[in-house]
């Protein structure tokens, strides 16, 4: 596979032969971070704001899980057992150290006897 070349207009490239995203950071070609950066560039989101949004989302999700767990008077270990996870995974979610996938959020919600509601709200456009 040929190495991607750096383009000043687009510092990321799509390797058509491999059919995958490749960052120009040759230390981590095809890495998750490289893919995120390529997506951010493609949709016009600055990588810094992408990271900030992801961190904020992780924090808010974790805070919601922790608050509900504490309201239910459950330990992280008990929640982890009911959700089929480890205690350390629950701690990472609650601490905002990871953005959990929808299936993980669903398992946590079920273990907390809660509903998982995901919706998109259109932004108001000022004319």
Image (cartoon, helix red, strand yellow):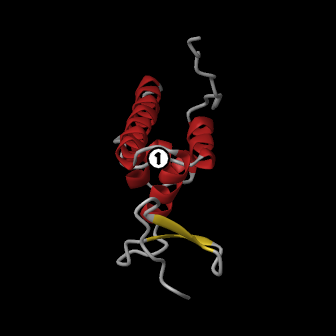
User: Residue at (42%, 31%) from the top-left corner?
Assistant: 60
Mark 1 Cα within 10 Å, few/some/many (few <14, many 20+)? Answer: many
Give me the residue at 59% from left, 11% from top.
127
Location of mark 1 (residue): 99
Looking at this view, name the residue that lies furthest to the top: 127
State the image quarter where residue 106 is shown.
top right
* Callout 1 secondary element: loop
Q: Nearer the viewer, residue 106 or 69?
A: 106
Q: Nearer the viewer, residue 54 or 84?
A: 54
Residue 44, image x, y percentages: 50, 44
Q: Is residue 72 left or right of residue 47?
A: right
Residue ID at (46%, 43%): 45
Residue 92 seen anywhere in this rendered image of the structure: yes
Residue 77 coordinates in the image, percent (x, y): 42, 47
Q: Is residue 75 visible?
A: no
- Give the vertical position of 85 relative to 75 (above or below): below
Instruction: Tell me the residue at 38%/35% (across/down).
Output: 56
Q: Whole-percent x and y of residue 2?
A: 53, 87
Q: Position of residue 6 (x, y in %)?
A: 42, 72
Would you place residue 36 above or below residue 16 in this image? above
Q: Nearer the viewer, residue 41 or 107?
A: 41
The count of marks equals: 1
In the image shown, does 83 or 64 lie closer to the viewer? 64
The N terminus appears in which quarter of the rendering?
A: bottom right
């Amino acid at each position: 596979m040929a190495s991607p070349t750096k383009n000043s207009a687009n510092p990321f490239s799509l390797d058509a032969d491999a059919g995958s995203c490749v960052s120009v950071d040759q230390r981590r070609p095809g890495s998750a971070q490289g893919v995120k950066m390529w997506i951010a560039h493609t949709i016009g989101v600055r990588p810094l704001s992408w990271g900030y949004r992801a961190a904020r989302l992780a924090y808010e999700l974790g805070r919601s899980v922790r608050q509900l767990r504490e309201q239910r008077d459950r330990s992280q270990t008990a929640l982890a057992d009911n959700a089929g996870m480890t205690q350390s995974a629950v701690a990472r979610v609650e601490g905002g150290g990871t953005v959990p996938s929808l299936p993980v959020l669903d398992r946590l919600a079920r273990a907390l006897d809660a509903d998982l509601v995901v919706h998109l709200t259109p932004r108001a456009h000022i004319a």
